[in-house]
Amino acid sequence: MKNLATKSGFNWLKYASPKTFYPLAGKLIPWCAISAATLIAYGLYIGLLVAPTDFQQGEGYRIIFVHVPAAWFSMFLYLLMALYAGMGLVFNAKLSYLMATAIAPTGAMFTLLALVTGSLWGKPMWGAWWVWDARLTSELILLFLYIGYISLQAAIDDKTRADKASAVLALVGAINVPIIFFSVKWWNTLHQGSSISLTKAPAMAAIMLQGMLIMAIGFWLYSIAVILMRVRCEILERDSKTAMFRQD
Amino acid sequence: MKARHKRFGLIAVGLILLVIAAVLITNSFRSNLVFFFTPTQVEQGEAPKSGSFRIGGLVESGSLKRLSDGLHVQFKVTDTAKTMLVEYKGILPDLFKEGKGVVAEGKLSASGLFEASQVLAKHDENYMPPEAAAAIEAAKAAKAKEGVK
């Protein structure tokens, strides 16, 4: 690791230490927060005012501009959390565990948002608030996994042990993410298939797609800002004895 | 071998075993995880004989009719190979349309009529403005005309 760091000329590993990461995160937060607010506002403007009415769902489809990006980030943040948890286990790196801890509440929030907006969308379009099909059920399990991760960490007093135990839970639960993603392909579900894929042309009008992608980037920047804020709090809470953070 | 390589190997092996287990489980649950049966599957006896289950497919064009009591509706669900007659009493969802997807929950009566207790509309993943949809329809119609000629 040492060799790698010196060879690249720039010692990026130095930011793996909470002490140097703390001020860096502080500098990044305002930029991410401002661009997130701008992009989400612009995305909502496109989604609610510019994008045309849908040919079969009318105006009701506009919830897609929140629902789909929220669902993407519920899954993506879980994978990111599991990755950080795994890195924490492998490298015994405290900052990795702190990042995983900081991601969980945001991921849970996006999961809940996807479930609630989906429910609001399902009633007028399908005719039911909730159905137990594979897509909806696996997304609900994702919410339970996030909640389980957060509670397990809160239940163990010894922070080192709490980090390790919850990291194992995060890694095991990661298996659910591909199941959510491919559920509409593998099984008969009421939920429709993906409109966007890497291999096919998107099954939606360009302006609709544009609004959705802008919302997604906005959600991403929002996640970064909030997660960095939370990780700074975690660093302060856990390292309150370190000289650098002492208030006196 | 350093300790962190060992830990990495352990986690990697654990995750691989987990993936294998998940694949086996989801494969064996494949038939239990379906949300609905198609008319062909019902015909082949894959759906439960007694009790309630769901069927899914497209509402056959021209098959929707309201019965004389004004409350019951009848329509045919097709998977383009087989069709089933469905009877339902209640309000149909807004997206319920002939030629579009539908999922109905209910029981199969002895006469082969599917008595639905709930009807859900299943829409597809296409989103476009009405003008684009109209253009596609027009193009399809023109193509069909060409074919007839």
Image (cartoon, rainbow, N blue to C red):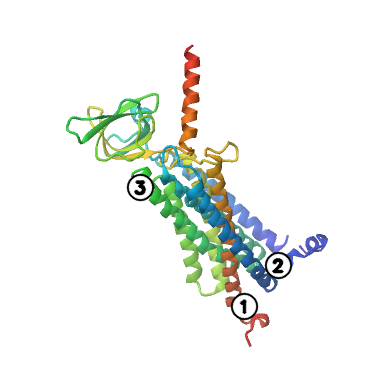
User: In the displayed structure, would residue A123 be above or below residue B39?
Assistant: below
Q: Residue at x 18, y 30 (%)?
A: B68
Q: Are marks 3 and 2 in contact (CB under 8 Å)?
A: no
| Chain under callout 1 | A
Nearer to the camera, A23 or B132: B132
Quarter of the image that includes the N terminus of chain A: bottom right
Q: Say what amino acid the circle numbered 3 marks.
A: Lys
Does the rendering let one see residue B119? Answer: yes
For label 1, the residue is A239
User: Which comes before the other along the chain, label 1 or label 3?
Assistant: 3
Determine the image quadrant of residue B110. top left
In space, the residues marked 3 and 2 are separated at their CA atoms by 48 Å
Q: Is residue A99 left or right of residue B129?
A: right
Rendered residue at 52%/49% (across/down)? A46
**Looking at the picture, how far across and down is residue B55, in whole percent?**
34, 35
Counting residues from the start of the chain, the first of labels 3 and 2 encountered is: 2
Residue at x 67% of width, y 59% of height:
B6
Contact check, label 1 and label 2, Cβ < 8 Å: no
Q: Position of residue B70 (x, y in %)?
A: 19, 34
Q: Which of pointers 3 and 2 indicates the residue nearer the eye? A: 3
| Residue denoted by label 3 | A123
* Image quarter of the C terminus of chain A: bottom right
Q: What residue do we see at 35% from left, 33% from top?
A: B97
Q: Which residue is mark 2?
A: A15
- Element at badge 2? helix
Classify 10 Å Cα crowding around label 2: few (below 14), some (14-19), many (20 and above): some
Q: Position of residue A83 (x, y in %)?
A: 61, 57
Please state which amino acid type lies under the numbered disc 1. Asp
> In the image, are marks 1 and 3 on the same chain?
yes
Considering depth in this image, is A114 or A66 the residue closer to the camera?
A66
Amino acid, disc 2: Tyr
